[in-house]
Image (cartoon, grey):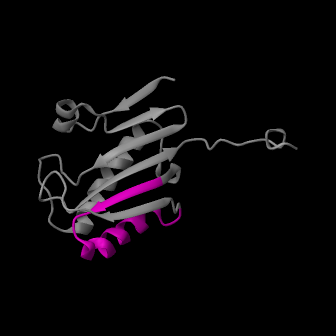
């Protein structure tokens, strides 16, 4: 199955050897996304960081035909449990109607100590539908 790769321009993509997102068939997988602005700056506010992560994710999704309503799973990594409410509120503003499955995990640290949150996502463009015959009917 052909893959369509998306780059966000992060220097880590080439250095480490990964894509921001890959579309394979009806699935789009978006890599762990850090809250870095184009100039390399990172806002210290966890809510702003979550917004930036999701902005990068939604931009990557759009490049392969995805949108927020296609997201079926998010994984949120926090370095401090006390940031969960602020990050959760931002996630809710973006995905409140979509309500994908979501996991929020507290980790010991992320690649850059300025990062308080990192988010990854999975989307399905056209959910597979099984007909009655496929279900044994």
Q: Position of residue 70 (x, y in %)?
A: 52, 49
Query: As displayed, is residue 60 above or below residue 97?
Result: above
Q: Does the magenta stretch mainly form a helix, a strand or a loop?
A: helix
Query: As displayed, is residue 52 above or below residue 60?
Result: below
In this picture, residue 122 sits left or right of residue 34: right
Does the magenta segment cover residue 87? yes
Figure quadrant of the C terminus: top right
Q: Position of residue 105 (x, y in %)?
A: 33, 64
Residue at horizontal 55 percent and vertical 42 percent from the top = 125
Front residue of this view, candidates 13 and 55: 13
Residue at horizontal 80 percent and vertical 44 percent from the top = 135
Query: As displayed, is residue 65 above or below residue 83?
Result: above
In this picture, residue 109 sits left or right of residue 136: left
Query: As displayed, is residue 116 above or below residue 13?
Result: below
Q: Which residues are magenta?
A: 73-97
Q: Position of residue 131 (x, y in %)?
A: 79, 41
Q: Quadrant of residue 59?
A: top left
User: How many numbered discs, if any?
Assistant: 0
């Amino acid at each position: 199955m052909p893959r369509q790769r998306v780059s966000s321009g992060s220097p880590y993509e080439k250095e480490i050897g990964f894509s921001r997102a890959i579309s394979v068939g009806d699935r789009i997988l978006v890599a762990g996304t850090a809250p870095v602005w184009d100039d390399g700056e990172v806002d210290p506010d966890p809510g702003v960081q979550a917004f930036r992560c999701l902005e990068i994710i939604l931009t990557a999704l759009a490049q392969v035909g995805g949108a927020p309503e296609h997201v079926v799973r998010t994984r949120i990594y926090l370095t401090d449990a006390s940031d969960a409410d602020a990050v959760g509120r931002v996630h809710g503003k973006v995905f409140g109607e979509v309500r994908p499955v979501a996991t929020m995990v507290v980790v010991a640290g992320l690649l850059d100590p300025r990062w308080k949150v990192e988010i990854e996502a999975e989307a399905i463009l056209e959910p597979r539908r099984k007909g009655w015959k496929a279900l044994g009917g």
